[in-house]
Image (tube, grey):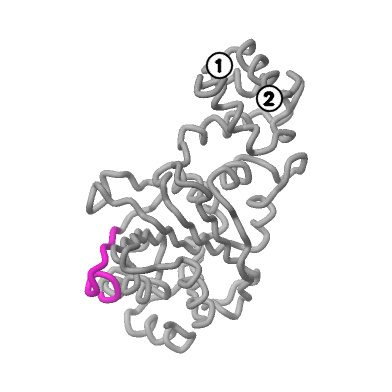
Amino acid sequence: MMNKQQVLSILEEYGLQAKKSLGQNFLCNEDVIGEILDLAELRNDVTCLEIGPGLGALSEEAVLRAGNYLAVEIDTRFEKRLSEVIRNHGGQLVFKDYLAFGKEDLPDPSFTPDVILSNLPYYVMTPIMIKVMKDFSSTKRMVFMVEEDALERIFAKPKTKQYGPLSVLTDLFGKKEKCLNVDGGSFYPAPNTVSSVIRIKKGSEEPFDPEIIGFVECAFSLRRKTLVNSLSSGGKYSKESIVSALSAIGRKETVRSEELQPKEFLDLYEILQGKKG
């Protein structure tokens, strides 16, 4: 596993350096790497997707533990290093911005990850987390490194300023937990922030319905308006049908999106979709 001296050696060997514009800070704490891999529960019958492997701190062990492994990396400067770490050990590697990544970019169209790993830069955390839920709705576990300050948005509760689509959707996806904090000294270059490792674990065998993502995002699109106005603004549902559905879950038509519990969003969605009476 990778320590700071190894990171410095790899950067020198391949003529690389961290790009601040991509939020690159390379993990170099062997204990943290081990804990993340243990949280991922990788085995030879597990398929793993890693987003943004960087120098391969997690990859070089993950590719050996997982039965099927794919990494998606935006920075082509790492191709030689990652090819040696990943491709030479049977893993697959695609160079592309994950936010522009589509099913057509998969080396194998049937690829469906059981586990998703990523060290998420703050500026793309929300769109990447929402995209993986949309792309791979049957994923069993997601293990993410995020800035500690971002936890407020992920674990936000109703009636708080931070409560929004990310907190609702991750709650609906599965059980989420903060697993450990990681100080700046565990990275090179060292950031001025503390990071946290979180895990979101699927709660049931039923796949998460990715169609609910657009529904929840629409519900929060006009935060100062009522939920009826927000949802009807999308043009898919009439105000009358939304009021009726709200009544069915015991809510008044004056309710705002930030007042609903995640489960209420699911009930409301299923009623409006005709999946639930």
Task: Give the residue pinned by disc 2.
Answer: 249
- Vertical relation: 195 (above or below) 186: above
| SS at badge 1 | loop
User: What is the x, y in percent for residue 229?
Assistant: 66, 19
User: What is the x, y in percent for residue 144?
Assistant: 52, 61
Whether residue 208 is visible: yes
User: What is the x, y in percent for residue 96?
Assistant: 33, 54
**Is residue 270 within the magenta segment?**
no
Task: Give the residue pinned by disc 1.
Answer: 237
Which quadrant: the N terminus? bottom left
| SS at badge 2 | loop
- Report the span colored magenta: 84-94
- Vertical relation: 52 (above or below) 221: below
Around disc 2, counting alpha carbons within 10 Å, would you say few (fewer than 14), some (14 to 19), or many (20 or more)? Answer: few
Pick whichever, 26 or 11, lies toward us: 26
Q: Is residue 7 left or right of residue 46?
A: right
Pick whichever, 81 or 61, lies toward us: 61
Around disc 1, counting alpha carbons within 10 Å, would you say few (fewer than 14), some (14 to 19), or many (20 or more)? Answer: some
User: What is the x, y in percent for residue 211?
Assistant: 46, 32
Say which amino acid is labelled 2. Answer: Ile
Residue drawn at 57 percent across, 47 percent down: 170
Q: Is residue 36 left or right of residue 155?
A: left
Tell which residue pokes out farthest to the bottom in this image.
5
The earlier-in-sequence mark between 2 and 1 is: 1
